[in-house]
Image (cartoon, rainbow, N blue to C red):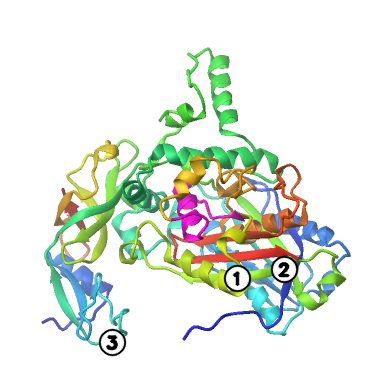
Amino acid sequence: MYDRPFNDNSYEQFLKEDKIMGARCKKCGALALPPRPLCTSCFGSGMEWVQFRGAGKLAAFTSIVVVPPPMVKEGFGKNNPYVVGVVELEEGAKIVARITGVDARKPAGIALGTPLRAEFIRSGQEGPDSKIYLAFRA
Amino acid sequence: MSKKKKLSRGVAVVGGGLSKLGLFKDRNSKDFFAEAYLEMVSSVDKGINPKDIEAIYIGNFTNDFFVNQAHWGPIISDLVGHVPKPVTRTEGACASSALAFREGVFAIASGFYDIVLVGGLEQMSRRSTEEVAEGLGMAGSPYEVAAGFTFPGVFGTIATAYFSKYGATRESLFDVTIKSHLNAPLNPKAQFPFTVRDFMNARIEKCRKKGEPEPNWKDERDFLRDLSANPPVAWPMHLFDCCPISDGASCLLLVAEDMAKRFTDEPIYVAGIGQGSGYSLHAAKEVTSFEATRAAAQEAYEMSGLTPKDVQFSEVHDCFSIAEIIHLEDLGFFKPGEGHKATSEGLTRLDGPKPINTSGGLKSKGHPVGATGVAQLYEVWLQLKGRAGRRQVINQNLRVGGAHNLGGTGGTCTFTILERR
């Protein structure tokens, strides 16, 4: 399907192409997201690419008020918190990501189980240096 | 496939030291270690000739970042006159010195050495809070950091999953904080030797002096509910759910069991020792449990032949309030989902049936990350020696205590059981 190594670089490259790509063990079918070069269930090394649809639900989250320096640069801070969480994808794998479309100022009102859809957010200028991150929108 | 693990030679703790914890901008890591070391030397009942120490293992997470100095082994060797004998630094994030302890135990158990010093150090106060957070973040999982998680954020995330699964609330966490802060004033080494009520009364007093309207908090819980007194950090973690930034150092003197009585009539023995590793948050089977803790606990229980019931008291890695509750369950002290209830019922208080973090815990004693693992074991050793002063666990037959140390966001965990025979 794709002749790319099963690693973080390929994962990020796929995100830039608006795709969530993980690895599946050809032998036992175990999923790895982000991709792994070997299967940690059966220890087989034959992996294949698998695309995730990007639908899931919120399994756990936090709203971050005391913000690390890279997020300050994106405009977040004490008065503008952001939500990150664990998303359980419908294919069964889990992933950590930014959660959008929820009120970060009212975290008590955010419910686990909320259905989410993947979105690909670009920051910085277009070009080879542009950053992309995966978010899930409620 | 797995066989029962045991040490081929027993190991005993015969001395220990811990520097006062806090923020000391006019002192450095060598000062902290010297303080702990000198206490250790004077603590050995029948004395130790420092020349007899054959090797040192020293845990440090990232003074490389905090004070721009790496390679702490030889600095400590030089400081205590140990040159040219070997010294090894271990790193396992906030579990760095528990790994040093473990290496020291293995070195003696193998028969290679008889007398070993283990310890840890960290100097965090030279950096701003934001920088410390960035430094600690280096021990997070790369995926979590990239997504924007902070340490409090990871534990906050775990808390939302725990609340939802077991019906606990933010109020349940108050009981962890209140309990830890009840123990800290009894510990002369603690960074915050104050109860939550002390903090509350100090705030009221401040308002009174400034002529501002006095807050009308009914009690500690009311105080902790107030976002102006207890501001959010990463939902549902608030200021009083989080351990502080600290400086400090710790050490313990380990000797082979067969020679322990040369140093003291009452050695404290290593009964069980375990270590595990864990996945990042997204790859973990469960968000509400640390697989690394469970693996470490299983190893330590199997080796010692003891059960969670036998462990009469324990230090656990309460970097955040929710973490303490989860450790209580992962270590088998309480069933999954019962840790918060046990805490709220007072079972983990100093006068309860299972005292947890008699030292005040990381939350109020302080958390100089690389020193913490051995600092926890120092507390267990003190308790078993009957030297814990005003926070001594009252039990005529106090015999078995545990120490649980966690590194990063659960990537490295250890559990060690010490016993008095």
Give residue B209's position: percent from left, percent from top: 58, 15
**Res. A107 image quadrant:** top left
Give residue B198's position: percent from left, percent from top: 60, 29
Name the residue tied to disc 2.
Answer: B269
Whole-number angstrom distance, CA of label 2 to CA of label 3: 43 Å
Q: Are marks 2 and 3 in contact (CB under 8 Å)?
A: no
Q: Is residue A132 visible?
A: no
Look at the numbered disc 2 and give the secondary structure of its residue: strand
Name the residue tied to disc 1.
Answer: B273
Choose between A126 and B112: the one closer to the eye: B112
Side of A30 relative to B211 (left or right):
left
| Residues rendered magenta in the picture | B314-335
Relative vertical location of residue B209 with respect to residue B224 in this rendering, above or below: above
Whole-number angstrom distance, CA of label 3 to CA of label 1: 32 Å
Looking at the picture, which amino acid does disc 2 mark?
Tyr
Q: Nearer the viewer, mark 2 or mark 3?
A: 2
Name the residue tied to disc 3.
Answer: A44
Q: How many residues crowd around disc 3 within 10 Å: few (fewer than 14), some, or many (20 or more)?
A: some
